[in-house]
Image (cartoon, coloured by chain):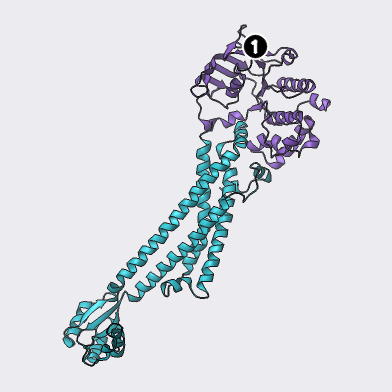
Amino acid sequence: MLRWLFVSPADRRLLGTSRFRGPTPWVIAIMSFSIMLIAATGLALASTAGSLTRAIEQRYALEVPNGGENLDALVASLKAAPGVTSIEAVPESEMRRTLGRWLGPEAESADLPVPALVNFDVRPGTDIAAIQRRAQTIAPGAEISAHQDKVAPLLRSMHALQWLAFGLVVLLGAAAAAAVVLAARGALDTHRFTIEVMHGIGATDLQVTHLFQRKIALDALVGSLAGAAAGAVVLLLLASGASFAGELTGGGTLSVLDLVILLLLPFALTILATWVGRIAVLAALREAL
Amino acid sequence: MDEAWQGAVPWTGRGRDVDLPAIAEFDSVGLRYGTGAEVLRDLDFRLANGGFYFLTGPSGAGKTSLLKLLYLAQRPTRGRIKLFGEELSEAPREALPPFRRRIGVVFQDFRLIRHLSAFDNIALPLRVAGATDEELEGPVREMLAWVGLADRASARPPTLSGGEQQRVAIARAVINRPDLLVADEPTGNVDADMAKRLLHLFTALNRLGTTVVVATHDVGLISATPGAEMIRLDNGGLADPTGMLRNPPPRRG
């Protein structure tokens, strides 16, 4: 299947010009560089969104608007509730410190009714309504809310950014493909005489295409790898010993799978460029007799 | 070099089908380029397998266009063309390469690939036919020696004289042992001595069974080839007063 890639030196000489000249490797290198950075950002966002979702998907907050008069009893009751795996009451001092950002010194006033907040985790399938009823027997105004609901807008934004990154990767791939088509047509024009001679002595379109396909594949591979390598250097510099994604997204990292995907990107770009180049050359050759 | 040129032709190809009644048949063939006037019209003739033909006529008569039809570089705009017994005027382009490999063409302007050596230019038809480097090395060296260019194997066309380029072009045209050899004004760029050698080469090839069609203005060339048929074109039409082309004689021995 890949025999066209390993042709004899004589067949390689047919196109005459030396490899890696012209804009194609450079264009593909720039595309590969951009794809690498955008894909890394998208994958880091996906990782962060995943971590965040996993961390909060079973986490709930119990809010008591009138304060924590029976807070200890409430915590003890919730701890004993079926399905609750951990529970933590937010200290009043921390609540006042939080309120202080809006109220200033007034937040320390003893007259201020500070709501109590208890965070707890449950096992999947736990009846949250039953826990709320249980809490309301001790603190009648108690309300339970899911953490997931509170961060949903953030997660939606992160997902939107992931799709944006994915879309940009696809667009850059398409731009690289378009550049290859233009380069292939230019190469066909440059070598029109050689092609005519080859056709004249009985070469098939596929034989002619293989010559160009090999050159396009090598140009694309060199450009892709160079661009990806530059992208990797930038990612490492930005990461500065920590996770680049962590710096950007607050803790998200690239998994081994993400790194494998990034490593495969230049090869995917090479395959795309080669395939598109082959189609473009074959289509152009069909216009001749 | 003379001896080399007059020696036996070093054939490297396959065996030859001698039973073909005609190697080419033109039936009411016409050709026009784009929307222009017809450059060839109402061509009806057959070329016998193993025949030797001169294609003559004034400039602009359509000789080169007729040759293009013969070596499958052009399709007729009307009529039918049979080559090697196959109707090819409307054959899909994917079907043409095997037939083109049976045709050797010598162009007036040689059409050598400038960045390839003489060796690589001559080897090209064998490479296209699938020969490996090892398989083609011997035949190409032999062919180079035969055309007297053994010591110029690595030279590129721009460094060769006109006559040398012509010989490389001829070697490329015949290395695959074509059934049909088409030459367009082969003596147009060479001196009288070289023209004589070329004619000797063509007759030698013809004796070995190759059908030869030579387009030329050179009357001396025609008169020096006894037994050859002449196809005369005039203003795109065939002037065949003897009717010989419609009913060609059996192949020459």
Chain letter of the cyan region? A
Chain of the residue on which disc 1 is drawn: B
Q: Residue at x 36, y 67 (%)?
A: A158
Q: Is residue A239 above or below residue A288?
A: below
Q: Decide if residue A2 is in sight here.
A: no
Q: Is residue A34 left or right of residue B122?
A: left
Q: Is residue B135 above or below residue A92?
A: above
Report the residue marked by disc 1: B249
Question: Considering the image in quadrants, where does the N terminus of chain B appear?
Answer: top right
* Residue B67 placement: quadrant: top right
Q: Residue at x 55, y 13 (%)?
A: B44
Chain letter of the purple region? B
Question: Considering the image in quadrants, where does the C terminus of chain B appear?
Answer: top right
Residue B58, position as x, y percentages in the image: 64, 14
Amino acid at dot 1: Pro
In the rendered image, the residue lying farthest to the bottom is A110
Q: Is residue B23 left or right of residue A165?
A: right
Residue A260, position as x, y percentages in the image: 50, 64
Closer to the camera in the image, B180 or B236: B236
Residue at disc 1, secondary structure: loop
Residue B124, position as x, y percentages in the image: 67, 36
Residue B8, position as x, y percentages in the image: 78, 25
